[in-house]
Image (spheres, grey):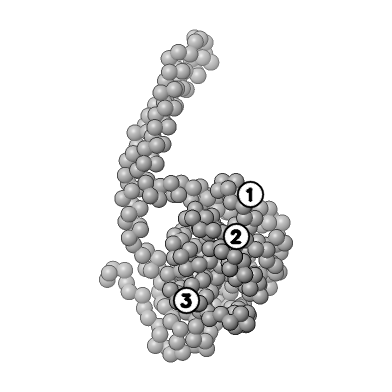
Amino acid sequence: MKKNLISVIVPALNESASLEQLYLRVKKVLDQEGKAFEFIFIDDGSTDETLNVLKMLNEKYSNVTILVHGTNHGKSIALMQGFAAAEGELAVLMDADLQDLPEELPKFLKKLDEGYDLVNGWRNKRKDTFMKRSVSQLFNYFTRKAFRCGLHDINCGYKIMHYEVYKRLRLSGDMHRLIPVIAMQLGFKIAETPIVHADRQWGKSRYSLLRYRGLLDMLSVMILNSTNIRPFHTFCEFMVIFSLIAVTLFCVSFTFPGTGFLSLLFINLCRFVAVWCVLVATLLPFFGILMEAMSRDYQNKHWHEVLLLKRFLPSKSHENITETPDKNES
């Protein structure tokens, strides 16, 4: 970690039109604040001129690092690449489309100085379509209830956090939307600050109705929060629950009065579900052992490193392009 350095981490997918302006506006704000900073761009498989623009910035400015994906791997993986490369005492996450204004950065810094570990943006007046706003509000509502989190805009991409926070995050799927929740579960203090959400001028929204994946990731985080340390114990606890359900249903089926058609149907249904619960209860400990082994293997592998094609280090020389070692050679 480098003291007093801010790492600005920006995933980019076909954002060539806004990248230079983004860099210059962030630079102006942080220069005014007297803050040293590095920029880490992750080109997540862009098909436009994004990489060429980033190469130009890399050659022109000595604090720009570029990480390149050959194909699109999603925002969570891109952020993990950025976290691994970052060295700053603080990390700023923001989107490349400039809907989140760089001029709002002093707000985040001021709020962070109040003793928080992570400060999340709150777009209280979003400039998005009605459908996108509605789905996002629904997602935020369920997430607040599930995790007892008081944030209004949990999936806002604009945030700032300490080194200890971003180095401990482990993201996959669409878990980037749940960064504040994950940080809270790790024991960090989180807060939010209202921000202006600008109209979209560049690029296009990648919103789709497949946001149910965010809900699936929410469930995943809830489960992994308990299985992260003791998977076998958790699955054994579920085994006990299913076993109790099976015993209860068997007792009901053998003591239920009546000989009519509906009574027999109910009795047979109880026995069928009871047998199913017994089978599930039998398998659960084996799943627990499997997850125990998989989680240990997963935690010992820097799996996101193998996805990088090239790494552009901050230098004006063309010699700073290094090929990522082939995973078969390691």
When the figure is inspected, residue 28 is found, relative to residue 276, above or below; the finding is below
Report if residue 67 is visible in the image: no
Residue at 68% over, 63% down? 194
Picture coordinates of residue 86 (x, y %)? 46, 73
Secondary structure under the numbered disc 3 in the rendered image: strand
**Label 3 belongs to which residue?**
3
Q: Residues within 10 Å of mark 1 (few under 14, many from 20)?
A: some
Count of numbered circles on the image: 3
Look at label 3 and name its amino acid.
Lys
Q: Secondary structure at mark 2?
A: strand
Q: Position of residue 177 (x, y in %)?
A: 55, 58
Residue found at x 42% / y 20%: 250
Asked whether, in this view, residue 162 is left or right of residue 239, the answer is right
Q: Residue furthest left?
A: 329
Q: Let me know if residue 256 appears in the view.
A: yes
Kindly identify the amino acid type of the residue bearing the numbered disc 2.
Answer: Ala
What is the crowding at mark 2: few (fewer than 14 residues within 10 Å), some, or many (at least 20)? many
Q: Residue furthest front?
A: 114
Marks 2/1: CA–CA distance: 17 Å
**Which callout, 2 or 1, points to the residue nearer the camera?**
2
The residue identified by callout 1 is 141
Residue assigned mark 2: 191
Asked if 126 appears above or below 53 in the picture, the reply is: above
